[in-house]
Image (cartoon, helix red, strand yellow):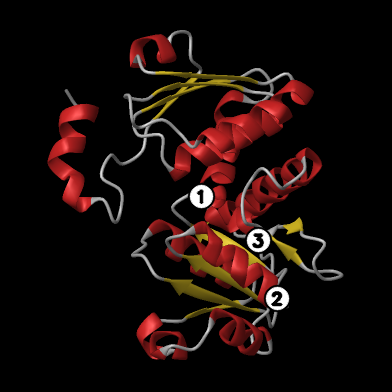
Amino acid sequence: MDTTGMTTRATGMRAGKKDLLDVATTTKAEVDNLLAAAALLKDKQRRGVPHPLLPGKTLGLLFQKPSTRTRVSFEAGMNQMGGHALVLPMADIQLSRGESVADTARVLSRYLDAIVIRTYDHSIVEEWAREATMPVINGLTDLSHPCQALSDLLTICEKKGRLKGIKIAYIGDGNNVANSLIEAAAKMGMTITLGCPVGYQPEQHVVDRARVEAAKTGAVIEIGHDPHIAAKEADVIYTDVWISMGREREHARRLKVLAP
């Protein structure tokens, strides 16, 4: 569930304030604790055991891109934990009339306990994190999708019983999901091999930063173009949409390259 994103990292920008902007800036201990808490809450939900950990808390959802799973999982998760999710349509708030992110972030921080932002450029969630006094959670940007990657780690734990040493093969477009999976694999000592067509590789600065982390954890990161090589001896094979939101005009070209 994307509700794993409710446990977030310390930014150091304000005492006690924690944000989740990407996986790379979490610690391994934070991820371990988050996954353990998520597994416990998931078990309680399945058994019908109440777990009102967030009574009276309100989570804002500000989505500039359409969403089904991310939005519903955050709303459902808040309800399950005794809190409330408040959807903030862009057309209904002053951002749509030219109010700055800084002003909006400061105002909403007076009413909300945290906010999930799904937007385009990653710099937007970084600006929200700088200006808001409440925690800011990245619900997806063009660069990363940390809640998705953390949810995937939980699924792998459930199916494989561990993360260390597990090999993930990622096939397809090296997009925001691929970037976050690379960061997650590096953080947890996993092997990740990517088979991405030429021109569709993940962000190089993400790979470079992840390899620094991998040197500490024993993780392996391999970037290639052949999906068959990437998938060899993999424990998990992963792909994502080939026509991401905002890339609709590239539909024909992407299908030709990604699905020959």
Q: Quadrant of residue 41?
A: bottom right
Residue lying at 46% horizontally and 44% vertically, measured from the top left: 176
Mark 1, secondary structure of its residue:
loop
Proximity of marks 2 and 3: CB atoms separated by less than 8 Å: no
- Residue extending farthest to the right is 15
Q: Nearer the viewer, mark 3 or mark 1?
A: 1
Residue lying at 49% horizontally and 37% vertically, measured from the top left: 203
Q: Amino acid at mark 3?
A: Met
Q: Amino acid at mark 2?
A: Met
Mark 3, secondary structure of its residue:
helix
Residue 237 percent across, percent down from the top left:
42, 24
Q: Quadrant of residue 166?
A: top right
Residue 143 visible somewhere in the drawing: yes
Mark earlier in primary sequence (1, 2): 2
The C terminus lies in which quarter of the figure? top left
Q: Quadrant of residue 208?
A: top right
Number of disc labels: 3
Q: Label 1, on which residue?
A: 145
Q: Label 3, on which residue?
A: 6
Give the left or right position of residue 96, taking residue 116 as reference. Answer: left
Q: Which mark is residue 215?
A: none
Pick the front one: 235 or 50: 235
* Vertical side of 22 occupied by 153: above or below: above
Mark earlier in primary sequence (2, 3): 3
**Badge 2, how many Cα within 10 Å: few under 14, some, many 20+?**
many
Q: Amino acid at mark 1?
A: His
Q: Which mark is residue 134?
A: 2
Mark earlier in primary sequence (3, 1): 3
Distance from label 2 to label 3 (Cα)? 12 Å
**Badge 3, how many Cα within 10 Å: few under 14, some, many 20+?**
many
Residue 101 percent across, percent down from the top left:
55, 79
* Vertical side of 216 occupied by 76: above or below: below
